[in-house]
Structure formats: structure tokens, C-alpha cells
Image (tube, grey):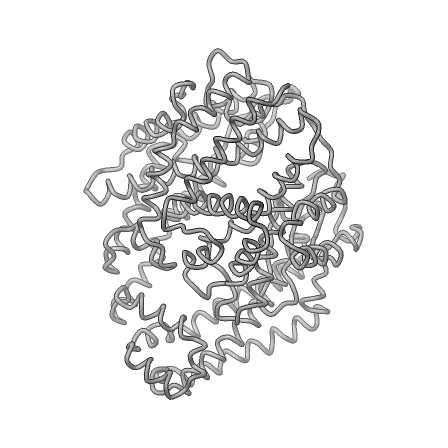
């Protein structure tokens, strides 16, 4: 670790988050933890009685909410304290204790799921009439009924629970291989220094203006994966088989139906994404051609896709300047939205800079019942950090609105909509910068930055989603997923998506082997759908103003009170159609045109 990083105790207090808003002292945390543990015993008397009468059911659900809110605060506080400095033994212990409590809660409440699935629609109607207050939980209980056909007998559920650990073995084994056992060779960076290639420095090396650096990093990475291709293909195939097994055991039509069922997403959403993007591959092909021309290359290779097209451009932006820019950029969302952002910036919702032992990256996190969410940054004075601040502030405001407008049971939102608010903020920031920037080089850099988001999020993640669907379908049809089959199929997809202006290097056929999200089946498509929804929403906000902003805030306030498709409809986006995908693709095309029109 760099010795230039300060120790946690030396960081200025104003640059840290104020976790005292959650628990004023660690002693208060410890006392609350002790009291919350005692609540577990209060669940025991309800076992076997949840469906007996509405009063018992309501009392249990309220108790569950009370416990869940308390556990959430404890878990978040302990882990955020640990993320400040992972070497702090005291906070390691607090985090471990909160995790133990979470496990104990799962065990104490294990009886509730099977019992609640025994409810019938008629019985619920009777309960609601006898006790109208129970309607507070109507959506929660109806969701249990909706999934009821996929809940098995108690005996079969017990069997599936016991083999569930076996189902995680492909993912866990891949993670261990990918993150621990697999070692990459050394390469030279742009300074001529010999460095060990890692997951963390791969993309920075691929962004180097030195082409030999990019090529050597690309070759070293994929040669390493190729040397493990049979092992990884076996793990990949095993994960698909285990998911197919559990899907069929729960009587889902396909694994895709199983994955989308939890949030009631129609499978047509997945298919429409792939179909619409495939019908607009010419836009992606145009971008690849543009990249080849701008880089001045006779032959564009796969290792040329990440390097910025604008050479030797740097812009230093301090944290204070980023805050000022952000407030101006988010002005279209109204004074009430800005007031919350100012509160976050002025009253220590944010942990700003790196220190020794601090968790890398960035996130927004919080807990229902807390005064506000928090943001962890590792701010550097550059454009990427400005966009990261905007992104995480979007998450924070989404959580703030949801937590303040929904009861605990519906306070959180699902992954399908999770990236919408963050990307809306980024899109509004980009629009502001493009409108106010006079320097042509900076403007071209920004357009390049924006176009890369479309390439890497909308097109690349859809390509992943298409590959994933093809492999699950092939497995269901009895096809053996050998390393050669996986590589050949993936290679053809890469060629299709990138078009004729690029030399599709043979090594890229192994890219599927390094994508950890494939071990969470049918997850990646949500990056593309969320991005498309956000681009459409930001366009509507900028064009329609007050009414669009009102609808958007209603969406932000929705939590999980409705299905995610219906929540987005409130904001003016219908993800059950292809229209938002098509709209986002139109924006991408307009950026390509705009970039061509700008002068160097």
C-alpha cells in the first residue's frame, strides 16, 4: 500500500462520513445489538400459528419488521465502520457479530416461509375483511401466493435446502480460481516498468496510449485463461446445469423464467432487449469504424477498444469543484432534490478520500430507519471521480426517497431498477458538461466518454445476455458445453456485435471465461435495461420539465411497493416494450454524429 495514504485517525473529520447519525457511540451499538438478539426468542411462539387468524399474522409481521429494521442498522453500521479501515480488529468483530445475528435470524424465521405459503387467496380476503390493518402487507402476502406454485412440499424443500450448498460450488470454485489461484504474468506498463498483471490493473493497461502495452496485457490475460479453459468450461457448464436442475424442480418453464420470476419480470423483456439491439448493430459497427479512424489504425484490434480516442487529455477537478458542478447539473430535478443533495454534501454523508485500509471503489449504502444513506468514495481529482460522485448520489437519493415514502416492508428496491437513478444523474451531468464546455478537446473527450458507456453497458452487456441465454438453452436441449463449443459460439457473437471494421482476435473467444456475473444466471441483462431506462428518463426530464420530474420522483419514492416494470411506468418508461431500448440507441447514434461534427 502506498505510504502516501494517511492513516484513518489522521483523516480530517470533515472528509469523513458521520456514522454517529446511525449510532452515536459504539457502546450504543453494542447495547442495541444485545437487545436485538433478545428479539429472536419472540419469534418462537408463532411457529405453526401464522395462518390461524389475522391478528396473529399481523403481530408476527410487525415484529418481523421491527427486527429487520434493527438488524439493518446494526449490519450497515458495523460494516461501514470496517470499510473505513479493514485492519481495525474491533470493527472486524462488530461486523462478524452482525453477520452472526443475520444468520441466526434466518434460522429463527425459517418456519415462516413454508407456513405463509399455506395461505390461500380466499383466506387472505377473509383476513383482510376481519382486520383491515393487515392490508398494509397485502402486496407482500400476494407475492408469496404468486410464487406458491414454485414452492414444494416441506420434505422436498428440506432436500433442496440441503443440496443448495452443492449448487453454489461451481461459483465458489470459479471465484477461488479466478481471484486467488490464477496468477497472471508480468507485463511492461507505459513507463517501461515491469508490473504483475492483475484484474485491477488490466483495464488501466488497456487504456494506455502505448499500443504495445495494450497488446501485451490483452495477450497475457487471455493466454492465462486459455491455459485453464477446460477447467473453467467445466465449472461454467456445471453452474448452468445446477441452475437448470433447481429451475425444473420448482416447475419453471425455463431457467430464464425462474430467474425473472422473483421480480415478476416478463421474459419478453429479456428477448426484446436482445432483438432490439440486434436490429441496431449497425450503430455499434459505425462506432467501431469511427474508433478505427480516430485512432489512425490500418487494423483495429480488440485491444484497441478501451483506449480513449482523445490523446493526451487530462483535466484536474477537485472534490469541491465536483460538488459545485454536480449541483448545477442536477438542477433540472428541482429544488427539493437539490436540497437533499446539499444536505449530503454539507453534513458528512460522504467519506471522501483514500486512507490506509479503506475499502476500494465506491458505493452508496444505508439502512431503513436511519436518517439518511451514506456514500463511500476514494476520490481522485479527475473526471471519472466526478461521474462516480454523481452516480453514487443517484443511488443515495433513490434510497432516501424510498425509505422516506415507504414502510419498512417496501422500503428497498430491486436490482432491476437499482441502476436507473444513478445513470439518470450521470446522463444529466453529461448533458450539463456538454452544454457548458467551450473547449473543443474537452467536449470531444466527454462525447467519447459517453459513447463508451453505450458500448460497454448497452451493447456489451446485451452480448453477454445473448450468450448466456444461448448456453442455458443449449444445455436444456442436451448439448454438451465443451470449451470449444463455448469459445466458438462466443467468438461468433463478438464478430456479429463489432462488425467488419475490427480484427476479432482469436484470443477474445475466451472472454466468457472471465465474467463472474455468468455464475449469477440472467443477471447482466439488467445493466442494459437499466441503462436504457435511465437514458430515456433523462431525455424526458430535460425535454418535459416539471411533469416528468414529478413522475420521476414518484418512481424514486416507490421502493418495492409495485413490480419494477410498473414502477418505471410511473416515471414514463415502459420496459415491457422495446421503445426505451430504441430511444437509448438513438441517443448513441446522435453522439456518433455529434463527435464527427466536432473539430480537433
Percent from the top left, x then y, of residue 87?
66, 52
Residue at horizontal 37 percent and vertical 52 percent from the top: 168
Q: Is residue 334 left or right of residue 552?
A: right
Quarter holding the N terminus? top right
Q: Quick one: 108 or 530, which is closer to the camera? A: 530
Q: Is residue 35 left or right of residue 298?
A: right
Does the rendering let one see residue 427?
A: yes
Against 148, residue 387 (above or below) is: above
Q: Within the image, what quadrant is residue 251 found in?
A: bottom left
Against 169, residue 499 (above or below) is: above
Q: Is residue 93 left or right of residue 155?
A: right
Q: Within the image, what quadrant is residue 72 found in?
A: bottom right
Percent from the top left, x then y, of residue 477?
19, 43
Percent from the top left, x then y, of residue 361?
61, 45
Residue at horizontal 47 percent and vertical 38 percent from the top: 457
Against 581, residue 40 (above or below) is: below
Residue at horizontal 56 percent and vertical 45 percent from the top: 543
Q: Quick one: 463 or 76, which is closer to the camera? A: 463
Farthest residue in the left direction? 478
Q: Is residue 429 left or right of residue 242?
A: right
Does the rendering let one see residue 423?
A: no
Percent from the top left, x then y, of residue 190?
63, 21
Residue at horizontal 52 percent and vertical 72 percent from the top: 407
Amino acid at each position: 500500500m502506498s505510504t502516501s495514504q494517511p492513516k484513518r485517525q489522521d483523516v480530517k473529520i470533515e472528509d469523513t462520513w458521520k456514522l454517529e447519525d446511525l449510532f452515536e457511540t459504539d457502546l450504543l451499538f453494542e447495547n442495541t445489538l444485545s437487545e436485538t438478539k433478545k428479539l429472536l426468542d419472540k419469534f418462537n411462539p408463532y411457529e405453526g400459528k401464522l395462518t390461524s387468524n389475522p391478528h396473529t399474522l399481523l403481530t408476527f409481521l410487525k415484529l418481523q419488521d421491527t427486527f429487520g429494521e434493527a438488524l439493518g442498522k446494526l449490519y450497515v453500521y458495523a460494516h461501514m465502520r470496517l470499510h473505513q479501515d479493514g485492519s481495525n480488529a474491533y470493527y472486524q468483530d462488530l461486523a462478524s457479530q452482525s453477520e452472526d445475528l443475520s444468520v441466526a435470524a434466518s434460522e429463527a424465521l425459517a418456519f415462516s416461509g413454508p407456513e405463509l405459503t399455506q395461505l390461500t387467496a380466499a383466506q387472505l380476503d377473509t383476513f383482510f375483511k376481519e382486520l383491515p390493518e393487515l392490508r398494509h402487507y397485502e402486496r407482500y402476502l400476494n407475492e408469496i401466493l404468486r410464487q406458491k406454485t414454485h414452492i414444494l412440499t416441506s420434505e422436498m424443500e428440506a432436500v433442496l435446502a440441503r443440496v443448495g450448498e452443492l449448487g453454489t460450488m461451481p461459483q465458489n470454485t470459479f471465484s477461488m480460481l479466478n481471484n486467488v489461484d490464477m496468477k497472471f504474468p508480468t507485463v511492461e506498463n507505459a513507463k517501461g516498468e515491469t508490473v504483475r498483471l492483475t484484474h485491477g490493473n488490466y483495464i488501466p493497461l488497456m487504456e494506455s496510449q502505448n499500443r504495445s502495452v495494450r497488446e501485451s496485457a490483452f495477450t497475457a490475460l487471455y493466454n492465462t485463461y486459455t491455459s485453464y479453459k477446460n477447467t473453467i468450461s467445466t465449472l461454467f457448464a456445471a453452474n448452468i446445469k445446477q441452475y437448470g436442475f433447481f429451475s425444473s424442480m420448482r416447475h419453471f418453464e425455463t431457467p430464464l423464467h425462474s430467474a425473472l420470476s422473483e421480480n415478476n419480470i416478463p421474459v419478453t423483456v429479456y428477448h426484446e432487449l436482445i432483438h432490439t439491439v440486434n436490429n441496431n448493430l449497425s450503430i455499434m459497427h459505425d462506432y467501431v469504424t469511427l474508433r478505427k479512424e480516430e485512432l489512425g489504425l490500418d487494423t483495429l484490434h480488440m485491444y484497441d477498444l478501451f483506449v480513449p480516442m482523445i490523446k493526451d487529455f487530462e483535466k484536474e477537478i477537485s472534490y469541491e469543484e465536483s460538488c459545485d458542478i454536480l449541483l448545477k447539473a442536477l438542477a433540472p430535478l428541482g429544488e427539493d432534490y437539490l436540497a437533499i443533495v446539499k444536505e449530503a454534501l454539507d453534513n458528512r454523508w460522504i467519506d471522501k478520500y483514500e486512507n490506509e485500509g479503506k475499502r476500494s471503489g465506491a458505493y452508496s449504502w444505508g439502512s431503513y430507519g436511519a436518517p439518511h444513506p451514506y456514500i463511500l468514495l476514494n476520490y481522485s481529482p479527475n473526471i471519472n471521480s466526478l461521474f462516480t460522485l454523481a452516480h453514487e448520489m443517484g443511488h443515495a437519493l433513490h434510497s432516501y426517497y424510498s425509505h422516506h415514502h415507504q414502510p419498512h416492508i417496501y422500503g428497498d428496491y430491486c436490482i432491476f431498477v437499482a441502476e436507473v437513478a444513478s445513470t439518470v444523474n450521470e446522463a444529466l451531468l453529461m448533458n450539463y458538461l456538454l452544454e457548458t464546455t467551450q473547449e473543443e478537446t474537452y467536449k470531444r473527450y466527454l462525447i467519447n466518454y459517453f459513447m463508451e458507456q453505450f458500448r460497454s453497458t448497452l451493447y456489451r452487456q446485451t452480448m453477454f445476455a445473448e450468450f448466456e441465454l444461448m448456453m442455458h438453452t443449449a444445455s436444456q436441449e442436451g448439448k454438451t458445453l465443451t470449451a470449444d463449443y463455448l469459445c466458438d459460439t462466443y467468438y461468433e457473437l463478438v464478430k456479429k456485435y463489432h462488425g467488419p471494421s475490427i480484427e476479432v482476435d482469436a484470443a477474445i473467444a475466451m472472454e466468457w471465461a472471465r465474467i463472474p456475473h455468468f455464475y449469477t444466471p440472467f443477471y447482466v441483462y439488467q445493466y442494459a435495461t437499466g441503462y436504457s431506462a435511465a437514458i430515456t428518463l433523462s431525455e424526458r426530464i430535460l425535454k418535459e420539465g416539471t411533469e416528468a420530474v414529478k413522475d420521476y420522483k414518484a418512481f424514486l419514492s416507490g421502493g418495492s411497493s409495485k413490480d419494477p416494470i410498473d414502477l418505471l411506468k410511473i416515471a414514463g418508461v415502459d420496459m415491457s416494450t422495446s421503445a426505451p431500448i430504441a430511444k437509448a440507441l438513438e441517443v448513441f447514434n446522435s453522439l456518433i454524429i455529434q463527435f464527427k461534427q466536432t473539430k480537433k
